Amino acid sequence: MRFSKLHLLKCGHFDDHEMAFPAGGSMDFQIVYGPNEAGKSTTMSAITALLFGFTGKEKFDFRFNRLLMRVGALIENGSNELSCRRRAGNALTDFDDRPIDGALLANLIGGQTADSFNRMFSLNHTGLREGGQAILAARDDVGQAIFAAGSGLASIATLLKALEDQSTAIWAPRASVERSYYVALESHKEAAKRLKAAQTKPAFWDDRKSRVVDLEAELITAKERREILARRRGDIERKRRTLPNAVRRIEILEGLAALEAIPRLPADTKSRLDTIEKELLTYNTELRLAASQAADALTGIDGIEINEALLGRMREFQILRERKGAVEKGEVDVPDLQSKAEAGRTRLGPLLRDLGWAIEDAMQVEARLPSRIVQTQIEDLLSKIQLNESVLKAARDTEANRKNDADKLRDEDDPSLDEVPFEAIKAHVRVATEKGDVDDAVAKATRALRGKEQTLETALARLIPWTGSVEDLDRLVVPTADNARSAAKAIDEAQKAVELLRASLAEKAKKIREEEFERDQLLASAGAVTAERLSGVRSDRDAVWHTLRNHMLGESLVSHPATEVTHYEDLISRADAVADQRFDGASASAQLAVRVHDLERLKFDEKGQEEELAAAGIVLGAAEQAWRNTLAATGMMITAGEYLAWLAAHKQALDAAVLVREAGAILQEANVKREEARSALVSSLAAANIIYLPDAPTAALKELTDDFVREFEGKQKARLRKQGQLIAADAAVKLAKEAILKAEQERHDLAIEFADVPGLLGFEHETSAETVRLRSKLFGEVRSIVDEVKGYIQRVKDIEKDNMAFYASLTELARDVGIEQISGESPKALLVRMLADVAEMQIQHQARVHLQTQYDNAKERETAAQAKLDATNALLAPILRAAASEDTEALRLILERAQLRDNLEADLERIDKEIVAAEPGKTLQSLLFEVAEIEMEVLVQALGEIETELADLEAAIERATAQHANAKAEFEMLNDGPDAIQAASDQAQALAEMEAQAEAYVGLRTEVAILRYAVERYRKEKQGPLLRRASELFSKLTLGGYAQLLVDASLQKPRLCGVRAGTDEVVGIDGMSEGTVDQLYLALRLAAVENIVASGLKMPFLADDLFINYDDERSQAGFEALGELARQTQVLFFTHHEHLLEVAERALGPANANICRLRSRP
Amino acid sequence: MFKFLHAADIHLDSPMHGLPSYIGVPVEEVRGATREALKNLVKLAIEEEVSFVVISGDLYDGKWEDMSTGLFFCREMARLGTKGIDVFLIYGNHDAESKITKKLPLPPNVRDFGSRKAETLIHEPTKTALHGRSYKDPAMFENLAAGYPPRVDGSFNIGLLHTALAGKPTNHEPYAPCTVAELTAREYDYWALGHVHDFDIISREPYIVFSGNLQGRSVRETGAKGGVLVTVDDGTICDVQHVPLDAVRWTAVEVDLAGCCSNNDLQTATRIALGAAIDALGWPGPLMCRVVMTGETEMNDLLGRSDLTLRDDIRALAAQFGDHVWIEKIIIDTSPVPASVGTLASEADEMVMLFDAGLEDPALMALLDSELTEFSNRIPDALFDNSPVLQAIRAKSFDKILHRAAKALATRTAAGTGP
């Protein structure tokens, strides 16, 4: 395939830029020249994108939107042409943007991918340099060098090394801590070691357990022996302790025998005797003391004398003493009261003068005063008159004030408000309010309509290639989806049939080329001669012979017979030679015949399939035409598949149109509402005489009316409030007038009532109420002072009467009790003396009572003491009888002897107990018997022997105990801890890790093996022809510096070498300069590409400034080498070096170097 | 009414298999899982106030030779003894092999059945007759059930048997074979079976029950593991309940990568599958997951790349579910998307064709064999037990390995970035 045109529509900075690559001449070499940033790289990337699709990584969208990107080309393939275009989204279309089948392009690409295309058919300076490096890296590996160049995989050595490094990092024969497998292995070993150490084997555990049991048994035996000895030692020690007690016991028994005659008195005899003696002493003392006290009390009583009469009137004395204080106070108060009465009289004087009364006696004054009832009535009347005056004044004030208020309210009233048609205005406002926010509703409906219209517009745009109005859309009759699916299925099946046949034909063509190649090889190399060729040369010969024969026969003469004869002889020789050659190469010729036959058969088949393809094409065409017919009514030309997508868009467009209509209706409705609302508001404003802007928003009009309504309602409320106030003021005036009338009537009545009052108060003529009030007040003060003076006089009289009665009682009582009043003695002094006598008599009386009590008590104690004394003596008598004693002294001697006997008996009991306690279970007698014949020395000796043996035994037990404890501790160390399972668990984990590492290692080594295998196979299959061709190219590129390439197989590891021209010096890659290695890579690479192209995959070869480091001479050689490739396939050479254009023309010939110039970027 | 607890296959102190060590794995829980499970058993028995516990064999791993394991078992059984709970046990094939069994004295509340013949022990408080026979040898192919005593009338009858019941597809040795019919014929009320590591109620009339093992120890033992709590009322079983007792749980999560094209897709699919599995289990303790990638995916080739990056990625992803979820291993069992234009195109690449060309070539197999022979010889046999890849190497069956590696290599070269 080749590019005839390249069309960059919107790509990078290109805008509808077309490049033409004309064919013609012996080679197809296209030079794309442009200065830096003219778009060479973009063009190369665009070619890849066109063939394989956009990857999204291209930087094509810096000028135009990505969605606008288009790359197109006119591609020629033999006699066929394909116009195609790739757009964003990777759809493939024709130049009219109609989708085309991707398989058309895929067939041309021959199954290449973008990767493989770039690797093989695209080479830039970087790739060239990397390729050179790859060959260097492969150094002594011819296979890798060839592979790197031939496959284009420059990183083969790097990849191989990386895989090997990765695998080596896991495992290699030599163990290392750097290798992950060995790290896991070490963990495994370490865990195994820990496991071994941590495990307690059953046999070991059993052994340790037995040892503990044995030592325990040994210890028990020793302890048992110690027990026996201890018992024996205890036995002897007991006997040693019993022996002294036995001796003492005998002594006690002898003592008791001596006291046998002493009578056995009760145990408490001594204590009872002590108590009795003590009580006798006490009772005697009490008896004496009580008698003495009785005598003393009797003497005291006899010495006291008492005045019984005085004592009998004690209560009366008490009353007089209590009254004495009041009498004394009265005597003090009388002068004071008398002076106060006098002062009252003095204050009365001026008042009486005011009244014009010349009276000094208070009683007389009182008689002239009006009665208290009359005065009260007069004061009451005066109060009423005063109150009436106040009421009348208040009523008159109220009447004046409220009348004033009413006048003011009448002035303020605004009757013009009644003229405004307020209810009508409110009704209009209600209408407008009910419509809501009409402006907003209209705006929203408008926006909604715009949105729907845009959606419809977008939906209509999606219907392209169909175009038309909404009405057209409604009228449009479209095929159904089922129709489209049926058509798509038919076309798809037909296309598949065509593709299959095309693929088969391509395969056939390839086989035919192979057969032709083999045939040509047979013809060229092995001397095979086809029958046709033999027949051909013989025909040539026979033709000349016929000419000569006719000449000889004279039928037709030749002009130069000799020349013709020589020519005939040459033809005879050639025919013979061909016949001989055919005979010599009979075998090859036979093969050739077979090849030719096969070739013919293949061609026959090819022709047949071409006919089938034509038929399939017709079917496809018919299916496509049928679809076009179906679609004709729509005026579109799209595939059935696209139509299905279009149909979905069609439905969306119809739906969108419905929505637009609905939105339009909503908007219309909103507009009507708005007009209604505005009309109502305008009416309101006109009625209210409010000026407004006709084109003001509805909301503004509404606000104006709302403000008016609010204000008017405020005014209405204020007016109503004042009207209420006016009514209230009028009512108040009326009430005030009534009150005035009432008060005036009352004043009149009071005046009549008042007419008699002056007379009552002593006025002889008519007098004013005020004068009356003053005189009445004066009467009141006089009456008050008169009452006060009268009170003082009465109290003096009462005091004097009480005091006289007190002194009379005093004198009478003194006489009754026989106390004489001393001459000149005042009654008060008499009273004092009498009270002193009474007090003395009370003291004497109490003393005598106290002594009498003492006497009675003493006599009672005396009697009691005597009774106790008698009783105690009665207790002592039986004790003396029991002891056969006459007195207590003898009794005490007997008691001492009895005590001695008791002590000895207690000692005996104690000793017996000690003896028995030393060996419980044995009787006293048997124990006494045991020690009856024993000597103390014998016991001491036996005890010593036992102590010695016990000491030895203790040491032995101590040793055995330690051994047992150790063994037991050791055994207990073998516990149920998890150490072993922890180690085993770690071991299992390490094993799993080893497994993971091992699997990774196997995978990596397998990849290494495959890669090596591929390299080796490539070398085997390709090395020969590739090296031969590369050798020629290398010689050319090095300007003959190197004559050829060869593989030096004499070394242990074959290596790629160059042979210097002239000297035949063999130079390894490591001996070549970097530039030469680059040329070597280019030679190998071009040879590989030629090989691929020769195999039938004719893809254009893109070369991007490969010669930037070459001088002109080498560049020319490079162009020549590329030119040879251009004889087989298209070469697109990109450069920004203008001088290379001339070099190229020199190398390729002006006719062969087509130059396409890119403009500088604006 | 009384309760008893049926357990089997305790395999005390048997280590977890297949879990590689990586940072953060709860080492202590993993190490001590079987012990913790036994503690849980004892705790349950005490809390439920069971009358007795029956253990149907395999207390220990056969080759395990650490007496501390036995001592731990005895200590836990003694704890039951302090609560008046008796234990009846038979020895299984592992116990018959174990030296621990032979040396260890059991606490007084534990009663074991002899191996010479089947015998009957009576639990007096509940009047339960327990029939059982221990294994004498590790490999017991005799039908032990046939020799079990007849039921004791008037008692509740339990048979303890360590058996690979006929007809039950297991990967266990076919020891003490017998049939359900034979067991039923004994007319016992409950057969407490051991040996099979999955809980299974084989029959309900009478109850024939495998309790399964107490603690899963590898990805082959997934799901909840524990014991069976049986409630008996008036001689009739009224409840049989499997109670999970495990301390660490295993699960295998299949991640279907169909439709996944990128690492992001893979991460998302794995996150969803893991999340669903974790939710379904509802297990808050340590959870060991094996992730098996399946499905036809365009990532098939990429997944073949033999590095440990994927493992690290999935481990990191698991960590997002909390610190109790761990990845045991990732198995790639995906397949390529069936032929498409893309596949055809890549196959057209000469280099890829070269990689594929060798897959049937004995020369490549020989080359690989020589590459791996030394490695294969030097790694321990234990590694081959659980690894199909390594087993294939030993069997010189390179086909699958080569295919996967070839695809991986193609991906590396297409990416152009090397490994």
Image: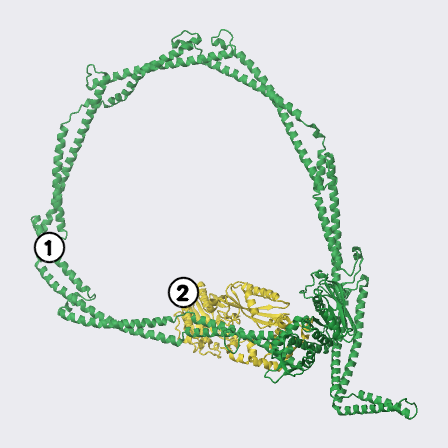
Q: CA distance from mark 2 to mark 1?
A: 71 Å
Cβ atoms under marks 2 and 1 closer than 8 Å: no
The C terminus of chain B, quarter of image: bottom right
Three-letter amino acid code at the position of disc 1: Ala
Chain letter for the green part: A
Q: Helix, strand, or loop for circle 2?
A: loop
Chain letter for the yellow part: B
- The answer to whether marks 2 and 1 sit on the same chain is no
* Quarter occupied by residue A842: top left
In the displayed orientation, state which residue is furthest to the right: A555
* Quarter occupied by residue A526: bottom right
Chain letter, disc 1 residue: A
Viewer-proximal residue among A670 and A112: A112
Q: Helix, strand, or loop for circle 1?
A: helix
Pointer 2 local density, CA inside 10 Å: few below 14, some 14–19, many at least 20? few
**Picture disc at residue A451:** none
In the displayed orientation, state which residue is furthest to the bottom: A553
Three-letter amino acid code at the position of disc 2: Lys
The N terminus of chain B, quarter of image: bottom left
Answer with left or right where residue A844 lies relative to residue A609: left
Estimate the x, y position of residue A1007 in percent, counting from the top left. 60, 76
**Residue highlighted by disc 2:** B83
Chain letter, disc 2 residue: B
Viewer-proximal residue among A992 and B223: A992
Residue visible at 69% across and 39% down in the picture: A703
- Residue A1154, above or below A563: above
Viewer-proximal residue among A3 and B174: A3
**Residue highlighted by disc 1:** A898
- Residue B237, above or below A610: above
